[in-house]
Image: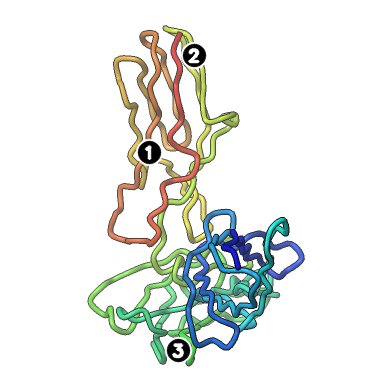
């Protein structure tokens, strides 16, 4: 018997799916009585183990809102056989509204202990006046949804509409949401949006720009949020800065950034969220920044 490297790759089972990071992978003896190890898949969907061979094993996978056909059995063989296994999961995919005037918001809720939050009531109170939608009278009464036994809830809302929200357990927190002009949105992101991406036009290739001293470059910039909207003012919830203001400086408007080269050197265009009240785990940075500025 020898110890062999075992690579377990976890992927999305759908035809267009990719790898699944953040999946807990546990390896047991074939009868499930002894656990050999536990790992979490990385950004490539890989969980690596060192296991005795030849031997048969039972593998169990877990990730919140992803379904797996547990247990899964694998046979690990001795070298020169390469022990690589592709296992598949079925992650939750948001349903989409069939009515082009509506957005279907759906998602999951958990308690402070991490378990599913059952029977949580969420109230949506329209902020718009009664109106006609495709010839039908759209009333502004309160809409209430309740999470099911899996902590899942969904609701159809009018695209581009605004609603006041009353969330059970957080009655002391006042929130107003803006519905995106999209067929679907993740409901927790709609309730607690964060700045997600900065999009530059012209595109910043390779995350770096070059400029001569005394010259300037102008970029149209859009800032997108996790609730699938583009903010009308890119400075409203983002604090822009230059790492070394002696090398380059900025001029900002609601829609563009002008970068001026001052002295030769290298610095960075930085952007951070102004609103830090919503904590997200993992706490990802804004996509698209920082941008390296090379002044010659």
- Give the residue displayed 37% in from the left and 24% down from the top: 250
- Give the residue displayed 50% in from the left and 36% down from the top: 221
Task: Please identify the quadrant where the N terminus is shown.
Answer: bottom right
- Give the residue displayed 44% in from the left and 71% down from the top: 188
CA neighbours of label 1 inside 10 A, class few (<14), some (14 to 19), many (20+): many
Relative to residue 265, is residue 225 depicted above or below? below
Can you identify the residue that label 3 sits on? 146
Q: Position of residue 164 (x, y in %)?
A: 37, 73
The nearer-to-camera label among 3 and 2 is 2
Q: Position of residue 27 (x, y in %)?
A: 54, 75
Picture quadrant of residue 245: top left
- Give the residue displayed 63% in from the left and 67% down from the top: 183
Sequence-first disc among 1 and 2: 2
The nearer-to-camera label among 3 and 1 is 1
Sequence-first disc among 3 and 2: 3
The numbered disc on residue 174 is none
CA neighbours of label 2 inside 10 A, class few (<14), some (14 to 19), many (20+): some
Mark 3 vs mark 2, CA separation in Å:
54 Å
Q: Which secondary structure, mark 1?
A: strand
Mark 3 vs mark 1, CA separation in Å:
37 Å
Picture quadrant of residue 133: bottom right
Can you identify the residue that label 2 sits on? 211
Q: Which secondary structure, mark 3?
A: strand
Mark 1 vs mark 2, CA separation in Å:
20 Å
CA neighbours of label 3 inside 10 A, class few (<14), some (14 to 19), many (20+): some
Sequence-first disc among 3 and 1: 3
Q: Are marks 1 and 2 in contact (CB under 8 Å)?
A: no
Can you identify the residue that label 1 sits on? 271
Picture quadrant of residue 10: bottom right
């Amino acid at each position: 018997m020898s110890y062999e490297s075992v690579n377990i790759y976890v992927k999305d089972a759908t035809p267009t799916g990719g790898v699944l990071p953040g999946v807990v992978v546990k390896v047991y003896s074939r009868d499930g009585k002894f656990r050999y190890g536990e790992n979490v898949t990385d950004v490539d969907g890989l969980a690596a183990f060192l296991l005795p061979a030849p031997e048969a094993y039972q593998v169990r996978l877990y990730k919140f809102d992803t379904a797996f056909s547990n247990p899964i059995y694998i046979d690990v063989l001795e070298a020169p056989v390469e022990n690589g296994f592709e296992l598949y999961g079925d992650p939750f995919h948001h349903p989409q509204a069939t009515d082009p005037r509506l957005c279907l918001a759906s998602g999951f809720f958990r308690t402070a202990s991490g378990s599913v939050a059952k029977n949580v009531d969420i109230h949506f109170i329209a902020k718009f006046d009664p109106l006609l939608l495709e010839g039908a009278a759209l009333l502004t009464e309160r809409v209430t949804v309740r999470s099911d036994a899996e902590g899942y809830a969904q609701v159809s809302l009018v695209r581009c509409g605004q609603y006041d929200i009353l969330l059970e357990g957080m009655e002391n927190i006042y929130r107003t949401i803006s519905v995106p002009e999209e067929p679907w949105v993740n409901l927790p992101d709609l309730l607690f949006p964060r700045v997600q991406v900065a999009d530059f036009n012209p595109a910043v290739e390779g995350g770096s720009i070059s400029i001569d001293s005394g010259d300037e470059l102008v970029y149209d910039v859009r800032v997108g949020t996790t609730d699938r909207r583009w903010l009308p003012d890119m400075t409203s919830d983002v604090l822009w800065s230059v790492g070394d203001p002696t090398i380059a400086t900025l001029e900002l408007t609601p829609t563009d950034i002008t970068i001026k080269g001052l002295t030769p050197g290298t610095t960075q265009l930085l952007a951070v969220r102004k609103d830090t009240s919503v904590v997200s785990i993992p706490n990802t940075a804004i996509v698209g920044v920082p941008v390296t500025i090379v002044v010659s």
